[in-house]
Structure formats: structure tokens, C-alpha cells
Amino acid sequence: MADALDAYLNENFVGRLREEKGRLFFAYDKAWLESRRFIPLSVTMPRQAEEFADATTRAFFDNLLPEGDIRAAIAKLKRVSERNTFGLLEEIGGDCAGAISLWPEGEKPGTHEGYAPISDRRLNKVFADMRKRPLLAIDDGLRLSLAGAQDKLPVYYDGTRLALPWGSAPSSHILKPGSAGFAHMPVNEHFCMRLAAASGLPVPQSVVLRKANALYLVQRYDRIKAADGTLSRIHQVDFCQALNLPSSRKYEKEGGPGLSACFDVIAKYCAQPAKDRLEIISWVIFNYLLGNADAHAKNLSLLITSEGVSLAPSYDLISTVVYRDLTLNLALKIGGEDRPEWIQERHWRAFADGSGANPRIVWRRMAELSAVIPGKAREVLAALDPSNEEREMLERICSVAERRAARLAGLKAVRPHS
């Protein structure tokens, strides 16, 4: 195991992560601190010469790693303890969320990089083995890390062919096969993302690939393509990182942040807080209408660039209400209530009052989305070509949206001219 890991933002060496007696420490490189291109690794890790202590360092770096069974499987394959954040990052830290990549001390990115086309046959095998070999963790040439608890694979997609990134080559898309026991999840997520776009929420492009099974392919918003076709990474942090919390506290009911803390992040760090605050307000209303109970703090992120900090586009939008084994209770309470059927006008008033925005703006956005989403949902469904079983599921999502939109529209404060 290396004594330290070098941290890069794209091709820029920015500092060093080290482990000492189980604790993690990070220090910026002096040249990076003095550079006019300096951006911080996190809003919790501003420009400073002093080394960051374990609590701050661990909260940022541990959130780069997968969670739950995926993390455990990778740890087993790599013969590393699943609690060993440093050891796991040494193994799979080459292509993380945002612009960061991690390399053994002295090893520079950019060597032996490229993309290896992956055939449909091998892709089927990859996903069949995903539970035992997530992120292709046994392949020494691949050092891929994506946070979260859902199966996924970073890939390069040119519009026709899929390829796997090797060395320090950045991925362009994320490919998801769905989850066992939750039918038609790729189509569910694609539908919700396209509906979000049709309703005015910023989301990346996505598509359903019809291979042996349906696969959800979404473009990475934290990547940008230059005129010559090369990809660069855009740095980001999720809201657990922004709040200095481990991923184990992403749920409000487990001591994680509520919406008030999320709005505080926007007010404290964003260059255009009014715009980004309204985006979160829209995100909350949209998730309520579509029945997404799993919208938590790690489903919100900040982009960090030389121009400042801004809210990232929405991602991981899915209707969980159609899956009977999943809870109906919301990951983030609305006005103090997490049971959707119990949310009344007073809860929405508390939500509006606590958002930091003019409550009239919040009510207007509630009225707009409750009016437009039922019709847009039917339009998006009509534009897709789902199987009969997929259509049945999407029809249920449309019905949930119609029912909840009618409830919102019935609130006094949402009615026109009230």
C-alpha cells in the first residue's frame, strides 16, 4: 500500500492525501495554492496552507466511494477492509465524481490511458457478474469509483459505441442496469429525467439502450467535451461533502441534513443563490409529484469552477412509489412531515417559509408544476416506445402525478388569484 496518494483536478496536481494510524489528512500543494487557477476540493476545504484534519478530510474523500454491498464486494475483491477509505481509493480512485483523481504518490495521470470498446457479449457478462465484481474492480487497468448504492458503470459513449476508460481517461456517461427486484428501473429513471426536462428542470441527456436487458445511459454533467473531442472533468461535491457528513448520514431520519440545511448550503456558497434556491424548490416539488421518496442529500451536488459555485443539474430522478418493497416516506421531510399522504397546506407553508425564498415564489412554482406535469407526463410517455409491462409501470407513475398534482392544486395558496 502507498504511503500517500496524489490528488489531481484534471491534469493539475493539487495536493496529497495521507493516512496515519487510521486517520486521514490532506494538504494542498504550495504551487496549487498560489495558482490563479486554484479551486478547492470542497467548500469545506478552502485555500489554506495547513493540513486538513481527519474529520474534514474523511468526509470529503469517503463520499467518493460506493456504499453498502457494492463497497463490500470491491473491498473483498481487492483484499482491503471496507472501512479502509485510503486503501479503497488507492485501488479505484482513478475516475471519481467531479474532476478529482487519485494516484499513488509520484505516479502521474495520463500514462497508458484510452478507451477499450466493449462488446454486447462482454457487457452482458459484466452486468451478470456485477454483484460479485462491481465497477469491474478485478481489472487492474480500471480504477473507477462512483458513489452510491446502486449498480452502475462509468463508460465512454460516442453516440454509437460503448467503451471502458483505462488509466486516467475520463468517462463520459454512466450506465445503469437497474436493480434486482425493482422491475424496469432503467425505463423508470429515463422517463422521470425526460419529464423533468420537459417541466423545466435542468437535467443531463439520457437514453435507454436495448441490449439483452434495458440499460439506462446518462450523460455526465461533470464532464465537458472540447472542440477536438477530448473530455475534461468539472469538479463537484455532493451535499454530504458540502456539509462535512459521511455518506452513512445521507438520510434525514438517520441524523442527516434536512431541507433547511440544503437551503443553507445554497445561501452560504452559491454565486447565484436565488436561482439555485428555486431549482431546489422545483426539485422538491417534482420529486413529491412523481413519488420519489429516495431524494436525499447525496442527490444534490454543487459544481465548483473558477467562476464560482453553482447547483448541479438534477440526477437520479426515479419514481420509487411504484415499487411495493420501498418505503413511501420521503427521505427529506416537507415542512416537518415525511408521509406524502399526510402533507397538508401547513406543511407546504412551512416548506415555503423555510426555503429562504419569497413564499409567493414558492407557491407560484408549486402551481406551475402541479399544472404542467400531468400533461407533460402523458406527452413524454407517448414519445417513448416501452414494452407493455414498462408502459403499465409508466401509467402508474402518471396516475400518481395526476393524483398528487390535484392535491397541490386544491391548496388555497396554489390557486390562481388567491
Image (cartoon, rainbow, N blue to C red):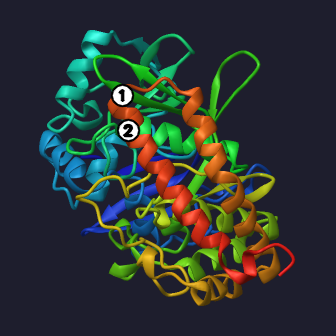
- What is the C-alpha distance between the residues marked 2 and 1? 6 Å
List x then y, in percent, for residue 33: 69, 58
**Residue at 83%, 82% in the rendered image:** 418
Q: How many marks can you see? A: 2
Q: Which mark is residue 388?
A: 1
Q: Is residue 268 left or right of residue 146?
A: right
Q: Horizontal placement of 150 versus 364: left or right?
A: left
**Regarding mark 2 in the picture, which secondary structure is present there?**
helix
Q: Amino acid at mark 1?
A: Asn
Residue 333 shown left or right of residue 85 in the figure = right
* Circle 2/circle 1 CB separation < 8 Å: yes
- Give the amino acid at mark 2: Glu
Q: Quadrant of residue 38?
A: bottom right
Query: Is any part of residue 329 visible from this angle?
Result: yes
Q: Residues within 10 Å of mark 1 (few under 14, many from 20)?
A: few
Residue 97, image x and y in percent?
Answer: 50, 46
273 to the left or right of 417: left
Q: Which residue is mark 2?
A: 392
- Residue 319 at what x, y percent from top left? 43, 52
Instruction: Report if residue 356 is visible in the image.
Output: no
Identified at 61% across, 33% down, the residue is 205
Q: Nearer the viewer, residue 224 or 127?
A: 127
In depth, the one of 375 and 88 nearer the eye is 375
Q: Residue at x 50, y 26 (%)?
A: 169
Circle 1 SS class: helix
Q: Is residue 257 above or below residue 316?
A: below
Which x, y percent locates residue 64? Answer: 42, 53
Question: Around disc 2, counting alpha carbons within 10 Å, would you say few (fewer than 14), some (14 to 19), or many (20 or more)?
Answer: few
Q: Which mark is residue 190?
A: none
Rendered view: 82 above or below 47 = above
